Amino acid sequence: MTQRLDAIQKDVLTAIALGQSLESTMLHLCERVEALSSNVMCSILRIDEGGRLRTLAAPSLPEAYCRAVDGTEIGPVVGSCGTAAYYCRPVEVLDIESDPLWANFKDLALRNGLKACWSSPIVSVGRVVGTFAFYATECRSPTDFERNIVTACVDLCAIAISVADSRDRINKLAYTDHLTGLGNRAALRDKADAILADAAQQERDVCLFYLDLDGFKAINDLHSHGAGDRVLREVAARLSALASDADIVVRLGGDEFVVLIQSDGTPLLYERLARILCDGISGRYTIKEGTDAGLGVSIGIARFPQDGKNVDDLLAYADNALYKAKAQATTKYVFFDASMRKDQLQRRALERDISHALELGQLHIAYQPIINARRGKLAGFEALLRWTHPIRGNIPPSDFIAAAEACGAINELGRFALREACKEASRWPAPLRVAVNVSPAQIATNEFARVVEAVLAETLLRPERLELEVTESVFISDPDSAFHTLQHLKKMGISIALDDFGTGYSSLSTLRSFPFDRLKIDRQFVAGMTQNPDDAAIVRSVMALAHSMKMEAVAEGVETEEQKTLLGLMGCDFLQGYLFGKPERFAVYDALTQIVTATAAARYHPPSIPRQ
Ligand code: C2E
Ligand code: CA
Ligand code: CA
């Protein structure tokens, strides 16, 4: 008998070491122990966090009895197990019918044919974590051998429970986002497969909401990271409350969250939930006492099974939709649709192709004249990248610059544009200038100023003849470093223009953040100014603003004589547009630069200012 008990111990320890589940290990233990002794039934209970008994294993006890016991709170007179756990000592009840400890439970036990119950507490790290009990169908006390079994089993159970608890704690740590207490990316990955499989089996839909906060970065930058953390915790709390029916809510990282919810899936329901999430998350958040800040949210939504069959696809598609939601000003949630998949594939293909375009010699620079409005003379050219794709033909920069930025090719492309433009401009008569567009990603590299210096040294172009055009977004990610780089370039004698003014953020604080030499008014306002009084008013005020801040104003997209005249009257300093010339290979303008006052000037008639 003792040998058989040793064998059971060894088997159970092996099962624990192999990581088998606590339930199956305990079940196995009960079955093996019951075989050693006649007419006993074994039960192993856990004590939950609320001090209630929970059945782990009791293979031979009637199911109705186990169900009735489950959830009973431990106490001084709660049968054998509840009392053993409460006092942390073994309780041997030889006759359930007459024992006062069983007064409230004896009917249940007797109805199920149980006459005696001997229970011992399972103690792990000084705490009662469960009970191990034998039930007998006759009134009797345990034999010595049965007492030995109990002693051995109680220790085994303590080890098994403590190992299972540690495993749960480690799992919890690995699957929890420590900042917010929500699940993390690993938890999503771990649970999503089961959620999707379950939904497939029940023919239900699953909806994945991919949330990204708007304006969070500003809070992090303007206030402390501690403030950012507080806001993220608050967002997590609101999200948990708003999506309490969700199968899982996780923080993917940064300011991105995912909600996965299974339902019978009417689009209307999802739409309503999207709206609830938008309304509930966006709003004011307390940063510290007396200070709060506004936060918005954008949501991309993908559905199972119609959009994607696994969580990776759903995430990618929801991210596509999110990209679109971010760009929208009003509706901040967007459902994925198949056209976005096509867009994404095309974007990927474009990114792949643009990264090889330079080495394959598919890029060249086009030059567009810029006219000095007052003197009616050619002032220089803007250099604009052109890509001739072997299959798709000419691809406009509006399509490929973003792809080059996304795949990192922009630095190489930008360097190419800068070198080509400076090389070309070094052959022009002074003081013709060349304006080169620069992406925020280029400025963000620490070496940008050095690259420009090297190109000027190589091409022998004087810095005063180079102008760099940047957009407001240059100040978004690291404003201080962008400022220093631009300052350095300006000190070298290079002029800096703010491009596309009037679009994007158009914040006046951008104008204050750097002493730009020129301000380029976006062509959409120029296009509208002769018809739309609002556009005309914008152009006029941008011009006034530029002049009051000692900057020169450049109007882009001048296509008609009427626009030219009106801009002249408004005091615009430089004009650029199809009226004077389209972006062309430089050969087209070669003659023009040789006689600086030629074509453009001949076509150009300065407006006469009407008398008041
Ligand atoms: P941008 O800097 O605003 O360039 C002006 C754009 O307006 C050019 O478009 C030009 O062809 C177009 N344009 C000029 N005059 C007129 C006109 O009278 N009417 C109309 N409708 N359009 C006119 P393009 O060449 O397609 O360039 C688009 C954008 O691509 C540029 O906008 C610039 O932001 C970017 N880009 C071009 N080359 C480079 C480059 O080398 N580096 C970087 N980072 N961006 C570049
Ligand atoms: Ca430009
Ligand atoms: Ca522009």
Image (cartoon, helix red, strand yellow):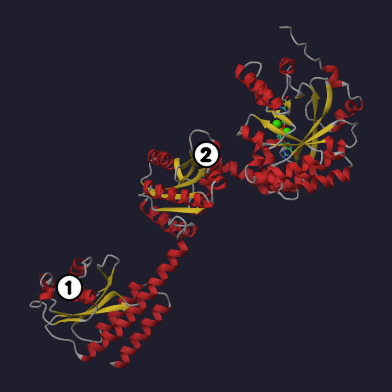
Q: Quadrant of residue 509?
A: top right
Image position of 376 (left or right of 303): right
The three-letter amino acid code for the residue at tag 1 is Pro
Q: Secondary structure at mark 1?
A: loop
Q: Who is closer to the viewer here, 508 or 354?
A: 508
Quadrant of image for the C terminus:
top right
Residue 310: in sight, yes or no? no
> Image height check: is 6 above or below 544?
below
What residue is shown with label 2? 325
Q: Position of residue 39 (x, y in %)?
A: 18, 83
Circle 1 crowding by C-alpha within 10 Å: few under 14, some 14–19, many from 20: few
Q: Which residue is mark 1?
A: 76
The amino acid beneath tag 2 is Ala
Q: Earlier in the sequence, mark 2 or mark 1?
A: 1
The quarter of the displayed image where residue 180 is located: bottom left
The reply to whether residue 39 is in sight is: yes
Local secondary structure at mark 2: helix
Left or right: residue 295 versus residue 550 is left
Which residue occupies 70% across, 33% down?
A: 499
Q: Say above or below: 227 vs 424.
A: below
Q: Residue at x 92, y 27 (%)?
A: 594
- Residue 236: x and y in percent read 43, 50
Q: Quadrant of ligand 3?
A: top right
